[in-house]
Each structure stands twice: as C-alpha cells, then as structure tokens.
Amino acid sequence: MKLLTLFGAIGHHDTVDGHGMGMALLFWAFALAVVVGGIFVISRRNLIVAVMGMVGSFLGVAAIYMLLYAQFLAVLQMLVYAGAIMVLFVFVIMILNRPEDEPVAPTGHLGQVVGAIGILYLVGRLAMLLWSVELPNKAVALAAPKITALGYDWGSVKAVGTDLFNGGLFPFEAISILLLVAVVGAIAIARPLHEDATTDEGTKSL
Amino acid sequence: MNGILFDVGYGHFLVLSAVLFLIGVAGVLIRRNALIMLMSVELMLNAANITLLTFSRMWGDEAALSAHTFALIVIGVAAAEASVGLAIVVAVFRGRRNVDVDKLTTLRH
C-alpha cells in the first residue's frame, strides 16, 4: 500500500481521476519487458535463455497487474509463474539436458513453403484485424482511469477473497480437485515404464 | 501522438495484451520444440488474463472483482496444464530422445 500511495503521489491524486506521468513511464517500461521477454521466448535456441525471457515477461505482467490495481493477483503471478512454473521448466530442461537441439528448418520442401505462406497469411489477417478496429469512441480508449469503488483497496486480498468465497466458491473447490488430479496424472505419466526398475534405474533410463 | 504516449488508458493495456497473445501464437506456430510451445501457451494465458483484468478495472466496482477470481482460476488451470504438459514432454523424451514435434508421427496413421 505504501508503494501504491507513493505511486499515486507521482501520478494522480487519490481522489482525482486522471492520467499521470508516473503511470505512463511505468507502463511503457514494463510493457517493454513483457514484449521483449516474449520475443526472447520464441526466438532463442538456448532453452535456458528462453526460460529467463519468460520469467522477465511474467515479472512485467505482474507489474502490469499492479498498474491495474490487482495487487493480490500480481503477487500470485510472481509466486506461481516466476516461482513455481519457472522452476518446473528449468528442471525439465536440466533433465533433457539438450540445450540446443532444434535445427534450423530445412529449406526447399513444398510443405514448408505452404506452411510459411499460411502462417504469414494468418498473422497478416490478425494484424489487419487489429489495425481495422474502429475505435467508436477514442475518448474511451484513452480515457483516464477512474478511481475504483474501494480506492486502492479494490484489488486487495480482502476484496478478492470476499468475492472468491462468496461467488467463486465452487470454482475454487473445483480447481483444488483439478490440481490434485493433475499432480497424480503427471506422476503417472512421467514414471519410468519399466516396473522392475528398483534402485536408480529411473535416473538411468532418462 | 503525445496523447498516445502519455495518456495511458485502457486501450494501451488491451493492445499490450493483443501483442503478447500474437507472440504466443507465433511461438506455437513456428517453433518445433515442445518446451517452447508450452512456454508460448503460458504467454497466451497471461495475455488473456491482462485483458480480463483491464476490463475489470474499467468497471471498477465490487461486482467486477469476480474477474479477479476468474483470473485466479486461470492461473490455477495454467499451473495444472504446465505440470501435465511437462510430464508428457519427459515421457516422450524418455522413449525417443528428442522433443521435436515434427518427429512425433507414430499416431498419424
């Protein structure tokens, strides 16, 4: 809350709607982190570098959540993505132990030419779609973010938790069962196939 | 131009989300390493979450907080998906010694 109060002092006042130079600076810095991290993920051949780009992107996304007053989700994003999922990916990369095994696509195959044209067409259509979106009211898109109903406490643990245990109780319980099933399934899938593997056969068969 | 640069509004967050989603789509389409494809899927889920929270912020009242609950559910589902996906990657690697999706053609016929 201290940080947000400071941020409000840089940007706009607590009770006044409006833009702020501080918000613009923070947005562009973290948006750059998000996009550059994402490009690192899809362009690096070294898997560790790709994972680090992913972590940078997720940290930027957490900061973007903070700009959207979603403090609780920002912290969760750091814990779950930049913590748990990153460790999971790094462990699997260590197990595979083949950092750069993806060859550059061989050229000359008709299928790949057709595939490239298809991808270019798809991405071009998506870009055209984005470009052609008619802003019915440009003032809305560039509108100054309004102060929320609860002020800076809008996305706090208390507010989100109240909603979670009132309206979202069933999904909350369902997600716990889903996670349990996923953990059991992951262990069942990744287990070594040979049942006679007793001592360190599991690590050897990797 | 100054307006776009300095007056950061909801449109900026939505465009950022679209760009991140496009990066994820491009990653799934052009990379053949299964791990990179999983990471790109995570990027797409994050882009969807940014959109959700932006529209929630646009309403700004207490009823719109259910979008935060939904984003929380999305994060949970993403964690489950990552664990199962990585387990599949490990199992495939154990049998075939690579994770190139172009070489996984056993089930094609």
Image (cartoon, grey):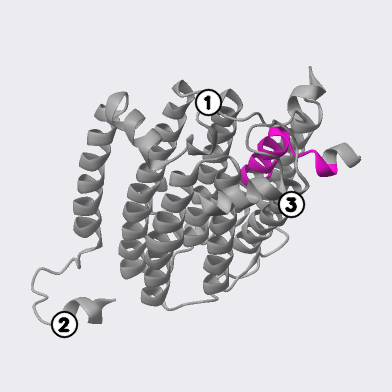
Q: Main secondary structure of the magenta part?
A: helix
Can you give x and y, in whole percent of width and height, for residue A125 in the image? 75, 33
Q: For this rendering, which residue is in front, A15 or A60?
A: A15
Q: What chain is tagged by disc 2? A: A
Quadrant in which residue A202 is drawn: bottom left
Can you give x and y, in whole percent of width and height, for residue A76 in the image? 41, 51
Hey, which residue is sitting farthest top in the picture?
Answer: A136
Identified at 56% across, 69% down, the residue is A102
Query: Tags 1 and 3 in contact by the CB under 8 Å rule?
Result: no
Q: What chain is tagged by disc 3? A: A
Query: Tags 2 and 1 in contact by the CB under 8 Å rule?
Result: no
Q: Name the residue that disc number 1 marks.
A: A149
State the SS at label 3: helix
Q: Name the residue that disc number 3 marks.
A: A28
Same chain, marks 2 and 1?
yes
Q: Is residue B14 in the magenta section?
A: yes
Number of other residues with Cα within 10 Å of mark 1, as a class: few under 14, some 14 to 19, many 20 or more:
few
State the SS at label 2: loop
Q: Amino acid at mark 2?
A: Asp
Q: What chain is tagged by disc 1? A: A
Alpha carbons under labels 2 and 1: distance apart = 58 Å
